[in-house]
Image (cartoon, helix red, strand yellow):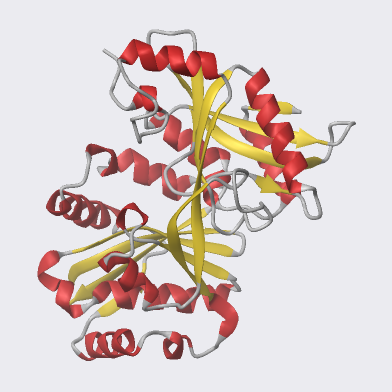
Amino acid sequence: MREVDNKEEWREVLGQLKNFDFVHTYDFHHLSEKNGEGVPVLFVLSTDNDTRPLACWPALKRSIESTEFFDLTSVYGYGGPLFAKGINVEWALAGIWEAMRKAGVVSLFSRMHPLYIENIPIGESRGKNLGDVVVIEVQITPHYLASYRASHRREILNAMKRGIQVVIDHEYRELHEFSKIYLESMKELGASSYYFFDTEYFDSLISSKDFKTILIYAELHGVKVAASLFVLTGNVMQYYLSATVDAYRKLAPSKMIIARAHELAIELGVEKIVLGGGVGSSRDRLFDFKAGFSDLTKPFYITQKIFNHEAYVQLCKLRGVDPHKESFFPAYRAQPFC
């Protein structure tokens, strides 16, 4: 068992395990580090001679202010463990969790990637189910529009007739326009400050060598009316960030963008597009919008583990928090330290 914190070794481990998404990469964890979310660390379970990885768990290591303790969390989006084919998953998880405990970790919070946890038994090992995410099986039909909900097909065709055009910006010439539309959309939604990503964040996304960021925008008579960032890693594409100018929302430009991304995924041989779920994992209007592109859903889980119960209770007392009454995890982070 070892901890990895450098890009080259991290990349080598993922390459040997083969199936992973951008949220597992060092580059994305490093981007989160620059965003002040923690220090990248990859827990790797290997063979006895320590050459072939059997499983890994990427995380962000966070110091706990005014104390000697630290904990682990996951990056924005989906995270969690990856396993080599044919491995005993419960044995691997036990080994990783024991390594985390020995490393002095107080607690672990992790969002679990819906595509890579199917071998984990439902229950304590997998964590808590919060809802579902929508996934498109890309190669299921060459006539991708036919697989959409009838109302989605109708709106996409109507948008095309009205003159909306969709462009894949391979050179990222309109990245500043995406940033502008995205930030305006976040303001209108009243989003928390976390989601107001700056130019440096977007520049880091498009410059990464660990994954490919795809910018697609829709325009009407030369005016950008919607834009989205998709992230491609191996045979998986994710619908990552998206925004629509409110005045053009009824024209359904975002539906056209997803349809174009679907078409591109077919061309590239991508197997799955992860569209995600609703706000707070609920089956809300956002979830219904995404479900119009695919009937396939995958369960979304989070893992919450306490490795040092004594320290956990001590930290909660320092903050005046009752861990039995606080729903936020870890409870001692329910309020910021002074």
Q: Residue placed at 59% from the left, 37% from the top?
A: 58
Q: Classify residue 279 by image quadrant.
A: bottom left
In the image, residue 296 lies at what x, y percent? Answer: 50, 74
Whether residue 12 is visible to the viewer of this picture, yes or no, is: no
Q: In this view, does 178 lie above or below 326?
A: below
Q: Is residue 59 above or below residue 147?
A: above
In the image, residue 19 lies at what x, y percent? Answer: 67, 55
Task: State how many labels appear.
Answer: 0
Left or right relative to 193: residue 172: right
In the image, residue 233 lies at what x, y percent? Answer: 57, 57
Left or right relative to 179: residue 130: right
Towards the viewer: 101 or 79: 101
Q: Residue placed at 36% from the left, 25% from the top?
A: 333
**Quadrant of the image containing the N terminus:** top right
Towards the viewer: 127 or 166: 127
Q: Is residue 51 above or below residue 295?
A: above
